[in-house]
Amino acid sequence: MIKTATLSFNGKSIELPMLQPTVGPEVIDIRKLYAEGDVFTYDPGFTSTAACDSAITYIDGDKGELQYRGYPIEQLAEQSHFLEVCYLLLYGELPNAAQMQDFEHRVTNHTMVHEQMHYFFRGFRRDSHPMATMVGVVGAMSAFYHDSTDISDPWQREVAAIRMIAKLPTIAAMAYKYSMGQPFVYPKNSLDYASNFLHMCFAVPCADYVVDPILSKAMDRIMMLHADHEQNASTSTVRLAGSSGANPFACVAAGIACLWGPAHGGANQACLEMLREIGTVENIPEAIRRAKDKNDPFRLMGFGHRVYKNFDPRAKVMKESADEVLDLLGIHDNETLKVAKELERIALEDTYFVEKKLYPNVDFYSGIILEAMGFPTSMFTPIFAVSRTVGWISQWKEMIGDPTQKIGRPRQLYIGQTARDYVAVNDR
């Protein structure tokens, strides 16, 4: 039996179907609301609006749960690895041994970028933010890979997906090397995905570089934990760009541009900058006082989450990696780390934070790990983009295959001038 909701206004009533998810809140279908009722709904930020149906990622913010294709993120982080998670997100099921080997082979053999793309980097200033470079270079990929831009061809969509998963780490590493004034390091097919990325970022021609397995594991976990996160701002941007029929490289470039914002992908950079602004443990009480003051613009970054009203499940896993990396590198007396640990302790004990459920989130720990590895804060968001690429492509492919999908066209609540007559300039 189909459930309905009745909406009454202006002396009329409209019956609206209620759609049933496999898990989560029911959804009222308002697609015919304008046609039958001549009204729109108003939902800034789309916080109560489902813009699509999806079978990829599920979040229960109240319980603090995150699932990729039904698998809890904690299980995947403990037992899986990033490329296996990529396969899961793209195809819906975990691969068998033969499928995993084939997938890894395809990704590994697409890691190099067209040699002419090197010239794009030289067009940027050396002090350009790596995200600016990535937006430009990824958007330009469609000029080099013409055989994977026809979105109506399933095979070309598949090739585009593999190419972006494979090449984004190379492009991000090149952006980093360029900003450092160092030569580009080509990908190495003998290394796993995370190790290869670290090698491209930190190796130099004049010395041998061996990736520590603990650092590689930590990077792999960072990528897994950021692989997808339902209909967030950048994913919605990719879907919106894709709804117009834009090629997949342009769509991912749009996602990267959206991710750049400090309220989204730049949150871990903002968190680390906040820790540095606090400076020392002695300054924490004043920072806490300011954070509790509604009239003070100061905010504690890295605490709480737009979706999670409980502990961010990714943060628990990320904290384990942070402890492992810091122990490996012998980083214990770092002042920023001391501030972070004290803030974490307060957040888990202070009544104000507990009542508002402002727990440390994934951004709080990921920034600490990346800084310990040697990455500057400007590289935090590009690494996020590398991790999220598979989520964007999975969501994009799902959208392309959805027969109900239409070009995105949000409505508005118009509050401007009503119609008026033009007056010539000399008569005004």
Image (spheres, helix red, strand yellow):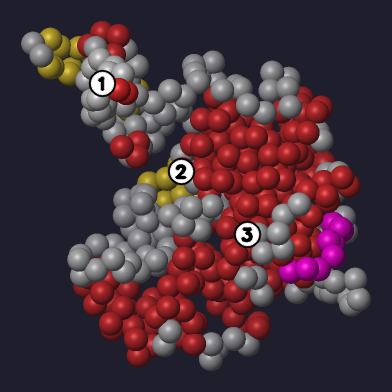
| Residue found at the far front of this picture | 426
Q: Which residue is mark 1?
A: 427
The secondary element bearing badge 1 is classed as: helix
Q: Which residue is mark 2?
A: 232
The nearer-to-camera label among 1 and 3 is 1
In the image, what residue type sits under mark 1? Asp
**Highlighted range, magenta:** 180-188
Give the mark, 3 or 2, whose residue is nearer the N terminus: 3
Tell me the CA gap for discs 2 and 1. 50 Å
Query: At 39% from the left edge and 26% from the top edge, which residue is drawn?
Result: 410
The nearer-to-camera label among 2 and 1 is 1
Q: Which residue is mark 3?
A: 129
Task: Please state which of residues 229 and 428 is positioned toward the viewer in this rendering.
Answer: 428
Tell me the CA gap for discs 3 and 2. 23 Å
In the image, what residue type sits under mark 3? His
On screen, residue 366 above or below 335: above
